[in-house]
Image (cartoon, rainbow, N blue to C red):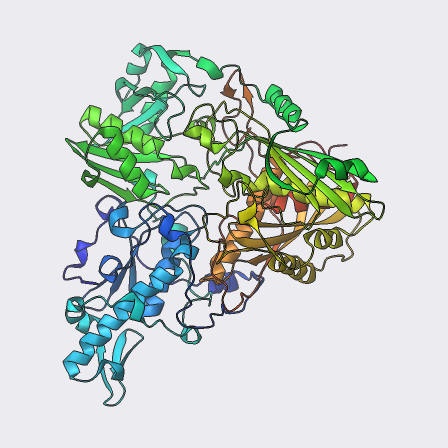
Amino acid sequence: MNIITNPKRLRGFERSIGTPKVENVSRRNVLKGLGIAGSFVLAAPVMSRPAFAYETGAGKMPHGTVVDPRVFVAIAPDGVVTIIAHRSEMGTGVRTSLPMIVAEEMEADWSRVHVEQAPGDEVRYGNQDTDGSRSTRHYLIPMRQIGASARTMLEAAAAKRWGVPASEVKAANHEVVHDTSGRKLGFGELAADAAKEPVPSIDGLKLKDPKDFRYLGKGEIGIVDLHDITTGKAGYGGDVRLPGMKYAVIARPPVTGGTLVSFNSDDAMKVSGVEKVMQVKGWPWPSKFQPLGGVAVIARNTGAAIKGRDALKIVWNDGANAKYDSVAYRTELEEAARKPGLVVRKEGDVDAALKSADKVIVGEYYLPHLAHVSMEPPVAVADVKGDKAEIWAPVQSPGGTREDVAKTLGIPVENVTVNVTLLGGGFGRKSKCDYALEAALLSKELGAPVKVQWTREDDVRHDFLHTVSVERIEAGLDKDGKVIAWRHRSVAPSIASTFAAHTVHEAPFELGMGLVDMPFEIANIQCENPEAAAYTRIGWFRSVSNIPRAFAVQSMVGELAHATNRDQKDMLLELIGSPRIIDLPAVKASWNYGEPYSSYPVDTARLRRVVEVVADKGQWGRSVPKGHGLGIAVHRSFVSYIATIVEVAVDDKGKLTVPRVDTAIDCGTYVNPERIQSQIEGAAIMGLSLAKYGEITFKDGKVQQKNFDDFRVIRMGESPLVTNVHIVPPGPDTPPSGAGEPGVPPFAPALANAIFAATGKRIRALPIGKQLAT
């Protein structure tokens, strides 16, 4: 724990765009003021014992965790407590939730807390990757320990000053109190002495009893950036300005793996404001997150740079991926799905069971490539001077960005500073730092600060796309309608292809997203992964491979319910079967989101429970008007359990609307229910958008879409009219799990099942597009 003697000491990017202030704006009060009612089941998270110890996979992440109040907490003489947020804020509220945990444990008054964004430095702060819905589940206990350590140091300092045993003093609401004498000292008065105290041993550290929590689990604290975001004062990547800064846009190869042959810059140089045109170094594909290369136009402003780029005459060599065609590739994937593939899970004898089945239901499900299209396209500012580099960028992995910049420039990692701005959305795209590397390379070459701004067209056409997929499921039924066989073949190019050439099978972490961890109680199960090559950049996308797997598996549940004249929910619960723990470690290629099975088993009792909760709260089976239908789906992802009911309305012209969505989420012990509600509401919007419109296609190796006119996202008027979020209270020893990503996967299958209930038409390929048109 540090003492701040000069508040202007604060690190970050305040010299260019200002340091955000803490604004304690309650979202609940805002909603009340607007007359809008949020709906969610709220019960405070229960922790049976103050220590609440459990194991996570945090220690196995690069650089692990750091539990040191001297790194994360500082107190000024006026009592203002500064808490470091070492994860990136992209709408999940992590810049609020993690500091709030620290404030809770150290008994800080939230109105006197300042949140400061950490730069990229994983040696100092531990792992900083803001992805995988890991932040709360990995950092609930470390942040509590940091806060408790700071509190213990303050109490020790007060006890010494008063000459009393530390056991007689207690921190409460930004003060340390001696009950016997009634003496009190504020945190600011104790800061200098507390900073001299040794950091307590974690083993002997006493955490607060959860019954005494003031902030955690209450849902009363809005995100710290809310005021600045809503008033336009928040600092995003595009807001950074440095003295003498140049502005750049880049023409990149239109085909992944393509190379520059030649370019003519004469017309570009005639554009007012354009100062220089230069080649940007590219790396042979695949090359992790290194730049694609191309031609950069440097100008006095971004508008001039874009006009200059439009005037370039460029000749490209499209390379080996020039024949990539979405239509032909879909046929290849479908053909592969109809043939045996690499067996990644096998129980019983599926072939024999399918042969003996009274009926076999076959479903083949297709999902295209998807683009992230965050509201803020990629952007980065770099200032490279000699062997030192400073970056300002909206990145999800500031520590990883720091290491990649150092490697790319050939300079020591300690000479690189990465300042993290707010992210205008991320969804996994900004965990790849190619745009920051481009800015660093140009700044080194020009000897001046450079901003590289991607346009929306750049963003759509040069994304690390969500993979395309064909999922084929064969389910065998006996004469009583019981499912006795299940074969699932999943065919999709892998994210691993971004890192290694000739990758044709999905990686274990992809196979573990709804394929090998399929939770149904069926005697004969076989999961296969036929080969699929990648012809474009594939990357992480919100929920990743859970999206196609949940769509296929839960759509098949709907098909089986129809084939056996059963209720969807009843069919689903029958397939989930008895409450049990699935022994995934025995499954080949098993993966559990990096978490130990001891803390995060696959628990079908919790899966059943979210189905039952959403069926109750969402009034499953309720009467709906003609042309309306209800659909249900459930999925476990990021070690959370999510069930969704979608009500759909389809008119006589095929127009689709969603009057109501209900989602039950069991994400274990939680910190901020307001953020959970927001994440699930956002997942419903994103899930509907992807299901209706999401599709990236290729012809001659080139992405055919360019902007929101042809890669559509739903507008406000198309969003679900009502989204109810039902948070399932956790058990006393249930550790926290993910909330940012798990809401997306069950939405599309619930929607498809609802469409079938409304119209009798089965949707097996996304996007829905014009499939419902009469």
Who's the residue at 25% across and 88% down the image? 182
Instruction: Point out the residue furthest to the bottom here.
Output: 180
Is 640 left or right of 239, judged from the image as shown? Answer: right
> Where is residue 181 shown, x and y percent of the image?
23, 90
Residue 204, image quadrant: bottom left
Residue drawn at x 30%, y 43% is 399
From where the camera sits, is residue 752 visible?
no
* Whether residue 460 can be seen here: yes
**In the rendered view, would you say 15 is above or below 723?**
above
Quadrant assignment, res 163: bottom left
Residue 615: % across, % down: 69, 59
Please determine whether, in this image, residue 336 is positioned above or below residue 164: above
Q: Between 420 and 345, which is closer to the camera in this rendering?
A: 345
User: Percent x, y for residue 396?
Assistant: 37, 43
Q: Residue, x 24% and y 34% (percent of image)?
A: 406
Tell me: 286 left or right of 391. right
What is the count of numbered marks? 0
Please determine whether, in this image, residue 391 is positioned above or below residue 621: above
Judged left or right of residue 192, residue 352 is: right
x, y percentage for residue 323? Answer: 53, 14
In the rendered image, the quadrant that contains the N terminus is: bottom left
Which quadrant of the rendered structure holds the C terminus?
top right
The extreme right residue here reads 479
> What residue is drawn where x is 25% and y is 46%?
13
* Figure quadrant of residue 77: bottom left
